[in-house]
Image: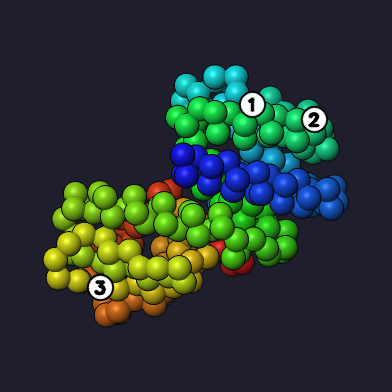
Amino acid sequence: MRLVGQIADLYTAGRHTLLDLAAALTPEDEAAFVPATPQWTVKDVYAHLTGVVADALGGRMDGVATDPWTARQVAERADRSLTDICAEWAELGPELEEALRAFPDLANPRLIIDQWTHEQDIRAALGKPGSRTDGRMTFCVDVMLTGFSKGWAETDLPCVVVTGDSGAWPLGEGEVGTRLTATDFELARAVMGRRSRAQVLALRWSPRDEARIGPVVDHLHAFPHADVDLLE
């Protein structure tokens, strides 16, 4: 139950942060393009985040996290204002958070990863940095790198030790082939495909041998690398 409560608490805190951010946005902000998303605007990202809640509560989970699933969430709210979209999220959010505590199977870590990642996508698009040291970021880094560690043996790559602000994660076993050191924020953005391949290669690797670290970089991401450098 500890993880269930943690996910619910983190989700609640993030929802309030994002709703507060939305309340201060201008029409130009709402229409701003958000890199690293499927050609979404800021308003579209809020539509997706709200749609996740509506779909989870409504049991519409077929194709969860696929492009058609998220595209439908955005399309269903295309004619609504950001204010209306946020009002829906404000209404449904507490119901989801209560359900997360009552039904542990709903407490999927991806809720936090998706929410925090998209908040950073929005902030990057608007030049409004924030939420770079909160519990959601630390949670995302730990969940993602722990997940990579569990499947690293299948890559046939040497052991890699990834070190961030909040800890270290050995990926694989045996002799360490390379080490990566970065801030938790950079690690979280990199593993979610919010950095180009060149940007990930430019992080602090030891030894800095592209022939050795290139294959690691090609496996150490949940979504494809950004097509261009993303600066935040």
Q: Earlier in the sequence, mark 3 or mark 1?
A: 1
What x and y, as percent, mark residue 88? 75, 30
Q: Which residue is mark 1?
A: 54
* 53 with respect to 161 (left or right): right
Q: Which residue is mark 2?
A: 80
What separation in Å lies between label 3 and label 1 (alpha carbons)?
43 Å
Residue drawn 29% across the image and 68% down it? 161
For label 1, the SS is: helix
Q: Earlier in the sequence, mark 2 or mark 1?
A: 1
Disc tally is 3
Q: Residues within 10 Å of mark 3 (few under 14, many from 20)?
A: some
Residue drawn 48% across the image and 54% down it? 140
Number of the label disc, if any, that sits on residue 81: none
Kind of residue at badge 2: Arg
* 81 with respect to 221 (left or right): right
What x and y, as percent, mark residue 116? 58, 51
State which mark lies toward you, 2 or 1.
Answer: 1
Of 158 and 125, which appears nearest the observer? 158
Q: Residue furthest bottom?
A: 207
Kind of residue at badge 3: Thr
Residue drawn 62% across the image and 35% down it? 97
Q: Residues within 10 Å of mark 2 (few under 14, many from 20)?
A: few
What separation in Å lies between label 2 and label 1 (alpha carbons)?
15 Å
Task: Tell me if residue 100 comes above or below residue 152 in the rendering.
Answer: above
Q: Which residue is mark 3?
A: 178
